[in-house]
Image (cartoon, rainbow, N blue to C red):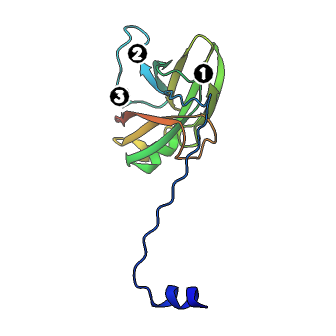
Amino acid sequence: MLLGYFLITTLRTSADIFDEEIVRHNFFDMSTLAFSQRHTANGTQPTQLFNVFQLQPQGYDIEAIRIKKEGELDFQYRLTSVNTTGSDALCDALEAEILYDRGDAYEGTLKSLSVDKSINTDHQDDWIMFLKLNNNNANLKNQQCDFQFKFKTWRGNANDQSGFWDETVLTNTVTTGIW
């Protein structure tokens, strides 16, 4: 009872608590997940891939890009296309054909582009990309479509924005002429 009275009436106390745990054979290691896009002819890092001026119906352009592993971790990656500015009608009319390892990886509309891959064991992937306009609608004359190719890498879930992931963007511009 006396102890209870003392604890209730005491305004200040002092106590030290000490705890120590020793963990042996515990290691912490850091790693990197990084990649780059490289020009296939000279190894430079481009910021723009397609820059097409006065594309005509049934016309196309071809570009190539190399995805190169720069970090320590192997990874999966996704290539998507995102329209940024310009004519929605032209952006919707553009078609893409993408070859990977000498085979078709994608053929369809540019706006629906989504391809998932794992990095090759030699740590580089070569892509050949065709951009086509197979539409002669008069409303597509003298239009411009700006879009991005987004390359996103990940180790766990493709939609996560946590853990190991990286994203790189290549800008593209296509203009049509008159026909």
Residue 179 visible, this angle: no
Tell me whether the residue at label 2 lies in contact with that at label 1, contact meaning CB atoms closer than 8 angstroms. Answer: no
Foreground of the two, 117 or 162: 162
**Of residues 83 and 75, which is closer to you in this image?**
75
Tag in front: 3 or 1: 1
**Looking at the rendering, which quadrant does residue 63 occupy?**
top left
* Distance between the alpha carbons at the discs numbered 3 and 1: 22 Å
Q: Is residue 61 left or right of residue 155?
A: left
The answer to whether the residue labelled 3 contacts the one labelled 2, judged by CB atoms less than 8 Å apart, is no
From the image, tell me which residue sits under label 2: 39
Q: Which residue is mark 3?
A: 48
Amino acid type at mark 3: Gln
What is the x, y in percent for residue 153?
54, 33
Q: Is residue 121 visible?
A: yes
Which quarter of the figure has residue 118? top right
Question: Three-letter amino acid code at disc 2?
Answer: His
Q: Count neighbours of disc 1 (C-alpha within 10 A) and say few if under 14, some if 14 to 19, many if 20 or more.
A: some
Give percent across and percent down for residue 77: 58, 31
